[in-house]
Image (cartoon, rainbow, N blue to C red):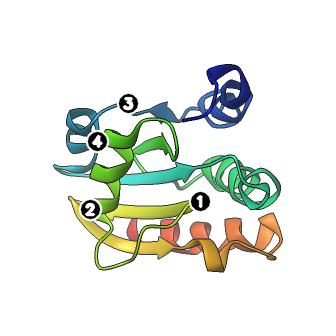
Amino acid sequence: MYPEYLVEPMRKELTNVGFEELKNAEEVDQAIKGEGTVLVVVNSVCGCAAANARPAARAAAAHEKHPDKLVTVFAGMEKEAVDQARNYMMPFPPSSPAMALFKDGKLVHMIERHQIEGRPAQMIADNLIGAFEQYC
């Protein structure tokens, strides 16, 4: 667990643009199950989250075609919520940061940490936007 004062600005990078922070397993279930599309961002304190993942998620969320719901869980903070989100991301191994797009409760697109590290934020955003165009 990290001190809240440390992660609060990192949370706000996403919540300030419309992402809903999920804090427990029940909230994750409610967000992912059911009809519609949901982007889940597994946020983290690492450098690639700051330089690549969060900027990419913000840019993609601003695209005219985007998921019905934008949600986030924070690795190293709300363990129950992160573990539940990762259960839905199977068979992909746990990864943070990570981004997963769900449609009608099914995983349809996944971006793992190794696809985020060392890549420009716009390239990651374009990847997400392509998935939004296909599934949303």
Q: Is residue 84 in sight in this rendering?
A: yes
Amino acid type of the residue that numbered disc 1 sits on in the rendered structure:
Pro
Residue beneath disc 4? 28
Mark 3 packing: few (<14 Cα in 10 Å), some, or many (20+)?
some
Gap in Å between the C-alphas at discs 3 and 1? 16 Å
* Residue 18 vertical position relative to residue 36 in the rendered view, above or below: above
Q: Which mark is residue 23?
A: 3
Occupied quadrant, residue 12: top right
Determine the residue positioned at 42% across, 74% down: 109
Gap in Å between the C-alphas at discs 3 and 4? 8 Å
Earlier residue among tags 4 and 2: 4
Residue beneath disc 2? 88
Q: Where the C terminus falls, by quadrant?
A: bottom left
Picture coordinates of residue 67 (x, y %)?
Answer: 44, 52
Gap in Å between the C-alphas at discs 1 and 4? 17 Å
Determine the residue positioned at 50% across, 67% down: 95
Nearer to us of marks 1 and 4 is: 1
Determine the residue positioned at 43% across, 67% down: 94
Earlier residue among tags 3 and 1: 3
Q: How many marks?
A: 4
Gap in Å between the C-alphas at discs 4 and 2? 9 Å
Q: Which mark is residue 97?
A: 1
* Residue 3 vertical position relative to residue 61 in the rendered view, above or below: above
Amino acid type of the residue that numbered disc 3 sits on in the rendered structure:
Lys
Labelled pair 4, 2 in contact (Cβ < 8 Å): yes
